[in-house]
Image (cartoon, rainbow, N blue to C red):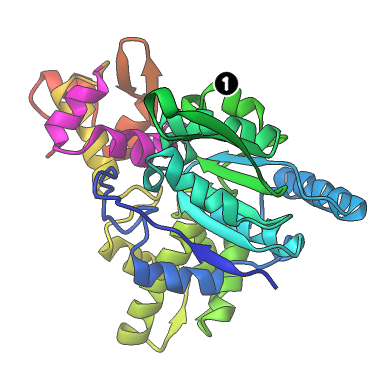
Amino acid sequence: MSRDKIISGDDADETPVREAVVSSALDPEEDRQQWNLRPKTLSEYIGQTTVVESLNIAITAATNRREPLEHVLLHGSPGLGKTTLAHIIATAMGANIIATSGPAIEKPKDVMGILSSLEVGDVLFIDEIHRLSRVVEEFLYSAMEDFQVDFVLDRGAYAKTIKVPLKRFTLVGATTRAGMLSAPLRDRFGIFTHMDYYETEELKRIVQRSAGILSVKIDPKGAEEIARRSRGTPRIANRLLRRVRDYAEVESDGTITRELADIALKREMVDEMGLDKLDRAFLRTIIEFYDGGPVGIEALSATLNEETDTLVDMVEPYLLKIGFLNRTPSGRKATRTACEHLGMNTAKRKQGQLPL
């Protein structure tokens, strides 16, 4: 059995995230509920077939050699299962896991305390690893590669460097922006995996599995309707399932059908494509205020009164995936498909006929 530790820090400067129903950010209570739904082993894990197969081979090989797993970097949008995989890796290796995040580690001494407490084979999970400071990144280089760190004692003329040996551990990093990691840090990961959005059929299976855990009655069509509006993200699928479950218990007999799911999700302002209020406002702003684009992200951020990182990390990835948005060197552009979905077009914009 693995022993979990959560190491937190001052996160007052973390980027705000939207609180819409399809946001991938979790509050503490939802996080506890979410953990009840997360798979505990690779055999239970649904989707990400290539990633799971690659990890399964690496874990089996490392176990057979009786040595710790190589360092793993998990890259993908929020809510796709990076944290879940980190805990599964620790469980599969029979190791303890210590979890922290990039913003919580401000100085080398912060990470030094963590590294010195690790036992052989332990898993150190760093979420949002791209937000580590450059000084901390450089401190990790020798820790990851040579399993030792250079620690400076005293200052000035009395300063001296001592090498502190570390027990061989596995670093699992999770990031939504792999490109923001420095090349030296990125190259020290032996296993680099990219997690993509899930297919509707995979999300349907996840919804059905979660419904079983939550003791919710749901028919296949109802599960498919929730899956179709989940933006290719398991975390959102489970969140929408709980919202539809609430509606079914209050307004119906507790059974989730396609019709009931449709009504419940419309009340939550999640449309047929999984777009919520902020998604639609983002597209409408491009079309209505900027004639379909191109427009810079900073201008969109100011117009919508939303943080730039919120738009880049939480809104744009899915809109790009479904073909509603284009990124060009000159800015963002809404596609014809997006205009048709919203019942808008730039020709009407010029004639002053756009719907509000």
Q: How many marks can you see? A: 1
Q: Is residue 120 above or below residue 286?
A: below
Please check the rendered image and state whether residue 306 is part of the magenta-colored stretch, yes or no. Answer: yes
Direction left: furthest residue: 352
Direction bottom: furthest residue: 253
Q: Choose top left, top right, bottom left or bottom right for residue 289.
A: top left
Q: Is residue 8 above or below residue 71?
A: below
* Residue 68 on image: x %, y %: 78, 50
* Residue 79 on image: x %, y %: 48, 52
Q: Choose top left, top right, bottom left or bottom right for residue 93.
A: bottom right
Inspect this view and state whether residue 269 appears. yes
Please check the rendered image and state whether residue 43 is part of the magenta-colored stretch, yes or no. Answer: no
For label 1, the SS is: helix
Residue that carries the numbered disc 1 in the rendered image: 183
* Residue 241 on image: x %, y %: 44, 69
Q: Is residue 112 above or below residue 149?
A: below
Label 1: how many Cα within 10 Å (few below 14, some 14–19, many 20+): few
Inspect this view and state whether residue 220 appears. no
Who's the residue at 36% across and 67% down the image?
Answer: 28
Who's the residue at 38% across and 14% down the image?
Answer: 328
Left or right: residue 145 versus residue 300 is right
Direction top: furthest residue: 330
Direction front: furthest residue: 158
User: Predominant secondary structure in magenta?
Assistant: helix
Amino acid type of disc 1?
Answer: Ala
* Residue 162 on image: x %, y %: 58, 35
- Between residue 225 and residue 36, name the one nearer to us: 36
